[in-house]
Amino acid sequence: SIEVDSLLGKSIFPYAKPVSLIETLISSCVGVNDIVLDFFAGSGTTAQSVFEFNLKDTSNRKFICIQLPEPLEESKKEHKIAYKAGFR
């Protein structure tokens, strides 16, 4: 969450995972020309991890990220900051 907060200036994605964790997972189970599928894309950490890991080992992994619309409620604690930022 700290990485994403530093980019956006506020905590919109409270459960973002560190890029380094996803890179570790990619390195242990994804081949150099594989496609990584993320059904819960959220803050885009998986996409960023694939980009960065490809740069490190000059490979050609691709990714598909899917995020279903999630209605936000102003009254929910975890939605308040995103709601105030204009997301609905």
Image (cartoon, rainbow, N blue to C red):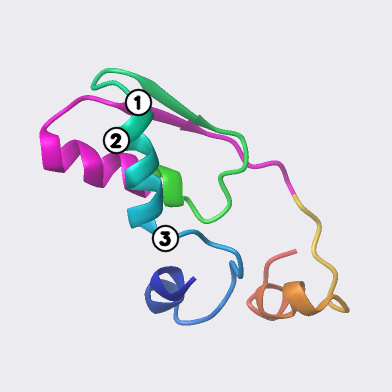
Q: Position of residue 86 (x, y in %)?
A: 67, 73
The kind of residue on which mark 1 rests is Val
Compute the Cα span from label 1 to label 3. 18 Å
Q: Nearer the viewer, residue 85 or 32?
A: 32
Label 1: which residue? 30
Label 2: which residue? 27
Label 2: how many residues lie within 10 Å, few (<14), some (14-19) or many (20+)?
Answer: few
The kind of secondary structure element at disc 2 is helix
Residue 4 found in image quarter: bottom left
Q: Marks 1 and 3: CB-CB under 8 Å? A: no
Residue 69 is marked as none
Viewer-side label of 2, 3 = 2
Q: Position of residue 15 (x, y in %)?
A: 60, 64
Label 3: which residue? 18
Which residue is depicted at the point 29% across and 35% down?
27
Which residue is depicted at the point 26% across and 18% down?
33
Q: Is residue 26 left or right of residue 83?
A: left
Compute the Cα span from label 1 to label 2. 6 Å
Q: Position of residue 70 (x, y in %)?
A: 76, 52
